[in-house]
Amino acid sequence: MSKKTKDPRMGIVGGQAVLEGVMMKSGDRCSLAVRTGDGIKVENSTSVSLRQKNKFFNIPVIRGVATFVEQLILSMHMLTRSAEMQGIDDAEPTTKFGKWLNRKFGDKIMTIASGIGTVIGLALAIGLFLLLPTFAAKGIDALTGGFIGRFPVLRSLIEGLIRIIIFVAYVWLVSLLPDIRRTYEYHGAEHKSVACFEKGLELTPENAKGCTRFHPRCGTSFVFVMLILSIIINSFLVWDSTWIRVASKLITVPVVVGIGYEFIRYAGTHENLFTKIVSAPGLWMQRITTKEPDEEQLEVALTALKNAIPEEFGGIRETESPADDPAEPSAEEAPETDPEPGQGKE
């Protein structure tokens, strides 16, 4: 029996939804397409990932951590650029504090706001997904007379379940906001466009519309894989001190991210019983984080896709602008079809 040949289209493009647009990345090429009042604006750039610069960052598990960090940087940059391309940052401040910030920082205000948002987001993530589950499990343990604390696996399972409940509730609640829902529609457009490309169909809104909006390499799936892995890895943490447990979980985050990346990378190009079972929760969650897009949103996603993929696959080449961060990741190494783990791919 001859060995099955890998589809050259599989796993070579990734992306994320941004404000009124989509970013796509393939290899060293990145394309951001945003719908504005003047039509679709496109911004192309190239960059080289750490994995291509140094072989150390290509070691399994380590490459996952490096890619994760690069994806975060890329994600924040693209969100900021999408706002700037729509002229959101051109709005005149109305408060005294806003005017002071505008005088003090000028055109750097969006970058500063993005940085502050990242810090607040990380603090919120640590509070919701590390501190709250740990203290909640500690409280449940106290109510049961210390029964849970005698079994590390049970304690880790309860903490993990609380973490999953918080994650699902958070994602569902923010989906009720009109602006977030629209971003989720662009997320769906991104997935459908990638699915259309991987099927080898002509890249048109009509063809993409009939494709699935669920993808195993989505950031939503990546988060769920990390949540499952954290339950397994944290079951080996036997310390009773709540703060030591929290510190230990922070230390093991790179391990969880690295292993999770390897699975998502494998699941993105392999379909078997194991990958279907482990990917199922993340794919189910995509029913919340992706919504059915309209044809105009699909047109934006396909514009970004065509500008990112190689010419032999139907890609186009427009004028490129230099990358702001040369350490942005290669999409064919990306663990998701959108850089958001937190994303918003996806």
Image (cartoon, rainbow, N blue to C red):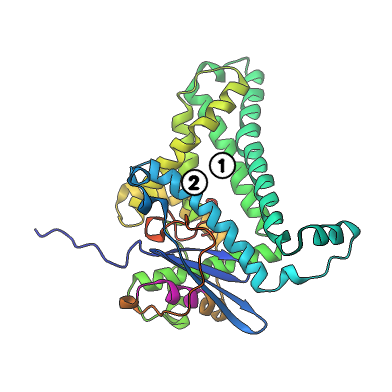
Residue 207 on image: x %, y % = 42, 80
Residue 28's quadrant in the figure? bottom left
Above or below for 280 versus 46? above
Marks 1 & 2, CB-CB < 8 Å contact? yes
Q: Earlier in the sequence, mark 1 or mark 2?
A: 1
* Front in this rendered view, residue 145 or 189: 189
- Residue 206: x, y in percent? 46, 82
For this orientation, the residue located farthest to the bottom is 38
Outermost residue, left direction?
1
Callout 2 environment at 10 Å: few (<14), some (14 to 19), or many (20+)? many
The spot of residue 276 in percent (x, y) is 36, 51
Residue 277 seen in render: no
Q: Horizontally, is 300 left or right of 143 in the view?
A: left
Task: Answer whether residue 303 is magenta in the image.
Answer: yes
Q: Residue furthest right?
A: 96
Q: CA distance from mark 1 to mark 2?
A: 8 Å
Considering the whole magenta stretch, tell me its main secondary structure.
helix
Residue 198 visible in image: yes
Q: Is residue 25 magenta?
A: no
**Which residue, given by chain and number where applicable, does mark 2 sit on?**
224
- Mark 2 is on which residue type? Phe
The image shows residue 123 at horizontal and vertical percentages of: 67, 40
Magenta segment boundaries in residue numbering:
301-310
Report the number of discs: 2
User: According to the image, label 1 marks what residue?
Assistant: 164
Residue depicted at 56% across the width and 31% down the height: 159
Give the residue at x 58% y 38%. Answer: 163
User: Residue 199, relative to residue 141: is it above or below?
Assistant: below
Q: Identify the secondary structure beneath mark 2.
A: helix
